[in-house]
Image (cartoon, rainbow, N blue to C red):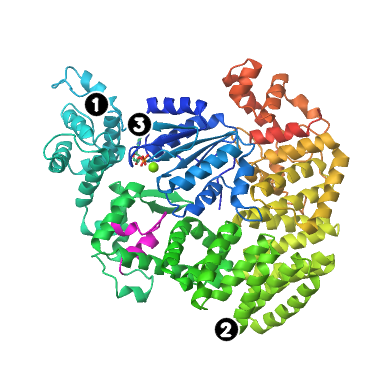
């Protein structure tokens, strides 16, 4: 589950060509130098989002922290605006820190450009958040898009006009092609021509159709969305036909006078027209798609928009098929995409779809008119409920696939949960919130707690007991992750009580085991011991259910850690790791390997610890569990220090610290003494200054690079670099301490760095600095300071191109794969 690399930003690649907007781009650039918040305001479909992304792509290079896009279109809940920005910045709400506090502290020292897109439906919370963040983070600049300005102090508003239209009077017939050329310079015509050519494959602007094209663009007010809808129709209609059809509609509305329609009505009429040309099945699918709050897949459409969907038999009776069969869904969807009514995106290899906000509003209107609104909403709720409930307890054995699904669908499920709140549907709500447990655990702990509290309170109020037990269990689990045993205790007590009342043995043993963890965390070790005993008895009664046994083992391991009994911790963790591996329970397997590796480390068994920790880290990377990644980077940092690799230790501990901060996590209590010892050893070996330099270089690595460093993998962006990540401790060929990168480690990788080109990588004594020419060494130092090539050029009075070529040479010589690695290397040289 690859995540976007940090610091580089997350702006999407543009899927279609971008046209014009030079004036507006220049204005945004200028305003952004004067103000820290620039809002692009204008009606739906006028091109705000495209302009914002293009501006941010151009300007992002000037920001050390890059440019980032937080998309609010899919967010329905005002309380989740902060979480959306947090997730967009690739941060995690996974530990004790509140999401907003984390956002503020993360941004405090960043130089970063943030696009907050589609604020209109959440104007107040979006404005509040932006104002708050701008205050907390002096290096932050924001481009917001919205139909109306945010009305925040210091905001500069750039009204986004439609695309530039062709001059009013073209000389017709044209004299020697000159007017055609000037027509092509009009932004609106350019967009129409490009989209028509892409749709029909043959369209060209000619002297024959130029007048009609110019007229059509004017009729459409230069609105990009309207132009795109009209252009795709050139597949089967001539421009003159399109113009005639639309002109009829417009004159109906304006009573014959030309061009008097307000813009939103022009767009609305064009969408109506485009919609009326659809076949019946296409219309049905389009209006029903607005049931999805976020992105959706073909499976979703089949289930929710056609009668053969498998959402639930209960819903079928009330469902009018609307003439759409499930087998037709793919064709209908393809056709809607081809007609620019539905947008197609790619989410990690899965095709998914989305409606433009303006189109969603229109589809919502059509759905209401059709009288299907309630049944579609209900069907959507039934579908997500059924999908989430299906083997909810087995989910942990196919966690990677499920998380991929949840990452894509979470906004739809959130919308269904909101419906449950509105309808007072406690039972479905608790089921949904509890079954999303692994998402909350690894992605959004605070949010999970909020949903669970809402639904559990509702369930208590209604005396509704179904599914409550697992809801309480999950609530307790999330509180444990938040290091909040006080919040965890009552929830787990309720889970135990419900389990006893309803005879749910799996729940009983898991809740008892989790309650033991909470007690240990609160310092009540005796109570924890008693609970572990009870959980063990309950787990034995379950027998076949592996997670019950594994839950007990996890509680036993932590209990042993708290008691300082390393041997007991190792025994329990070893059994837990084996059982979790056998069952395919990746999350627990990772945790158990972490426990086992840490225990080995504590006992000084370094060779044994390393592969365990590395395997756990690989799992944490797959699951994208940031807190586990932090623990493991720290543990591997300790391992490096204890095995005499002080510089590697400094870097790994630095990398761990930055992952920790971005996940709002804290150092684990029982790891603290080891960490302290390891840090002291590394400082003693390197001296305070070089340790600090290495630590800071590690902090500057992006997360992916930090993980690669820890796992000894080659750097990701090997552009121009012959080898991978150089051996982090000492030059390849200098010989590494036995056991550190040998059979025990993932040793295959550093070997790549042992290619001749990397043979002279600077060593600890700094001799390798001689490998770089003086100018290259100067450039490398400035790269390490974080300067861009342009800034370096200015500093050294050489051209940016020359700097580019120096940087390429440095990468080659060091066998490094990125600027961050150059920085890491420079930091470890003698000053
Ligand atoms: N300058 C442009 N060049 C190319 N396509 C554009 C441009 N501006 C808008 N579009 C297209 O027009 C449609 C509407 O634009 P969008 O930016 O989503 O509008 P808004 O955000 O104002 O609702 C999108 O399909 C977009 O790709
Ligand atoms: Mg938009």
Q: Provide the secondary structure element on which disc 3 rests.
A: loop
Q: Which mark is residue 166?
A: 1
Residue 230 is situated, as x and y percent measured from the top left of the image, at 23, 41
Res. 654 visible in picture: yes
Query: Could you tell whether 521 is left or right of 819 in the image?
Result: right
Residue 317 is situated, as x and y percent measured from the top left of the image, at 30, 75
Q: Nearer the viewer, mark 2 or mark 3?
A: 2
Mark sitting earlier along the chain (2/1): 1
Res. 741 visible in picture: no
Contact (Cβ within 8 Å) of mark 3 with mark 1: no
Circle 1: is it few (<14), some (14-19), or many (20+) Cα within 10 Å?
many
Residue for point 82% across, 70% down: 568
Q: Nearer the viewer, mark 3 or mark 1?
A: 1
* Range shown magenta: 287-307
Judged from this view, the residue extending furthest toward the top is 797
Q: Which residue is mark 2?
A: 502
Mark sitting earlier along the chain (2/3): 3
Q: Which mark is residue 263?
A: none
Query: Could you tell whether 353 is left or right of 748 in the image?
Result: left
Residue 171 is situated, as x and y percent measured from the top left of the image, at 16, 20
Circle 2: is it few (<14), some (14-19), or many (20+) Cα within 10 Å?
some
Q: Quadrant of ligand 1?
A: top left
Contact (Cβ within 8 Å) of mark 2 with mark 1: no
In terms of image quadrants, where is residue 574?
Answer: bottom right
């Amino acid at each position: 589950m690859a995540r976007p690399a940090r610091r580089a930003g997350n702006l999407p690649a543009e899927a279609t060509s971008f046209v014009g907007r030079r004036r507006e781009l220049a204005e945004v650039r200028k305003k952004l130098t004067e103000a820290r918040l620039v809002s692009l305001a204008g009606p739906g479909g006028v091109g705000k989002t495209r302009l914002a992304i293009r501006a941010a792509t151009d300007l992002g290079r000037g920001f050390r922290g890059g440019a980032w896009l937080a998309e609010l279109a899919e967010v329905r809940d005002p309380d989740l605006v902060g979480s959306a920005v947090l997730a967009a910045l690739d941060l995690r709400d996974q530990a004790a820190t509140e999401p907003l506090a984390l956002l503020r502290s993360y941004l405090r020292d960043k130089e970063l450009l943030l696009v907050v897109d589609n604020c209109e439906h959440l104007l107040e919370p979006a404005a509040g958040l932006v104002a708050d963040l701008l205050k907390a983070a002096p290096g932050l600049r924001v481009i917001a898009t919205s139909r109306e300005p945010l009305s925040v102090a210091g905001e500069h508003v750039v009204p986004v006009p439609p695309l530039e239209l062709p001059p009013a009077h073209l000389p017709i017939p044209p004299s020697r092609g000159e007017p055609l050329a000037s027509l092509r310079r009009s932004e609106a015509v350019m967009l129409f021509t490009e989209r028509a050519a892409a749709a029909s494959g043959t369209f060209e602007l000619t002297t024959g159709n130029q007048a009609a094209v110019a007229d059509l663009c004017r009729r459409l007010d230069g609105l990009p969305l309207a132009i795109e809808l009209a252009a795709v129709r050139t597949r089967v209609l001539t421009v003159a036909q399109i113009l005639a059809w639309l002109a009829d509609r417009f004159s109906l509305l304006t009573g014959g006078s030309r061009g008097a329609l307000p813009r939103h009505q022009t767009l609305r009429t064009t969408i109506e027209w485009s919609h009326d040309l659809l076949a019946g099945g296409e219309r049905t699918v389009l209006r029903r798609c607005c049931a999805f709050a976020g992105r959706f897949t073909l499976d979703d459409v089949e289930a929710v928009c056609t009668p053969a969907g498998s959402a639930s038999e209960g819903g079928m009776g009330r469902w009018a098929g609307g003439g759409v069969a499930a087998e037709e869904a793919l064709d209908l969807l393809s056709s809607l995409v081809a007609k620019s009514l539905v947008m197609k995106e790619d989410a990690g290899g899965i095709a998914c779809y989305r409606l433009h906000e303006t189109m969603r509003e229109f589809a919502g209107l059509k759905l209401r008119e059709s009288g299907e609104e309630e049944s579609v909403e209900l069907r959507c709720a039934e579908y997500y409920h059924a999908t989430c409930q299906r083997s909810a307890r087995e989910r942990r054995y196919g966690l990677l696939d499920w998380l991929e699904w949840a990452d894509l669908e979470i906004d739809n499920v959130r919308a269904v949960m909101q419906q449950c709140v509105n309808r007072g549907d406690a039972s479905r709500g608790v089921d949904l919130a509890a079954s999303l447990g692994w998402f909350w655990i690894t992605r959004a702990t605070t949010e999970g707690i909020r949903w669970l509290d809402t639904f559990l309170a509702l369930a208590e109020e209604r005396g509704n007991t179904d599914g409550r037990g697992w809801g309480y269990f999950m609530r307790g689990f999330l509180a444990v992750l938040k290091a909040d045993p006080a919040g965890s205790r009552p929830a787990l007590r309720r889970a135990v009580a419900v389990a006893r009342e309803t005879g749910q043995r799996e729940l009983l043993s898991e809740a008892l085991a989790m309650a033991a963890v909470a007690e240990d965390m609160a310092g009540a070790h005796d109570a924890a011991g008693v609970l572990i005993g009870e959980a063990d008895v309950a787990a034995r009664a379950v027998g076949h259910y592996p997670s019950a046994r594994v839950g007990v083992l996890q509680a036993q391991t932590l209990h042993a850690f708290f008691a300082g009994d390393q041997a007991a911790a190792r025994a329990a963790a070893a059994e837990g790791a084996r059982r979790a591996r056998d069952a395919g329970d990746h999350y627990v397997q990772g945790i158990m390997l972490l426990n086992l590796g840490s225990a080995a480390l504590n006992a000084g068994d370094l060779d044994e610890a390393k592969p365990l920790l590395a395997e756990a880290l690989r799992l944490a990377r797959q699951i994208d569990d940031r807190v586990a990644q932090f623990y493991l980077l720290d543990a591997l940092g300790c391992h490096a220090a204890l095995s005499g690799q002080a510089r590697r230790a400094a870097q790994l501990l630095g990398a761990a610290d930055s992952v920790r901060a971005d996940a709002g996590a804290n150092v684990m209590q029982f790891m603290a003494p080891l960490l302290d010892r390891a840090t002291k050893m590394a400082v003693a070996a390197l001296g305070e200054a070089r340790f600090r330099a290495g630590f800071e270089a590690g902090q500057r690595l992006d997360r992916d690079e930090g993980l690669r460093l820890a796992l000894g993998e080659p750097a990701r962006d090997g552009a121009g670099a012959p080898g991978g990540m150089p051996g982090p401790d000492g030059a390849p060929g200098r010989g590494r301490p036995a056991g550190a990168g040998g059979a025990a480690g993932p040793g295959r990788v550093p070997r790549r760095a042992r290619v001749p080109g990397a043979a002279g990588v600077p060593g600890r004594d700094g001799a390798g600095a001689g490998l770089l020419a003086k100018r290259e060494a100067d450039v490398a130092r400035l790269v390490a300071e974080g300067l861009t090539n342009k800034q370096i050029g200015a500093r050294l009075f050489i051209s940016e191109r020359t700097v580019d070529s120096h940087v390429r040479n440095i990468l080659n010589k060091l066998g490094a794969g990125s600027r961050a690695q150059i920085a890491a290397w420079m930091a470890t040289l003698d000053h």
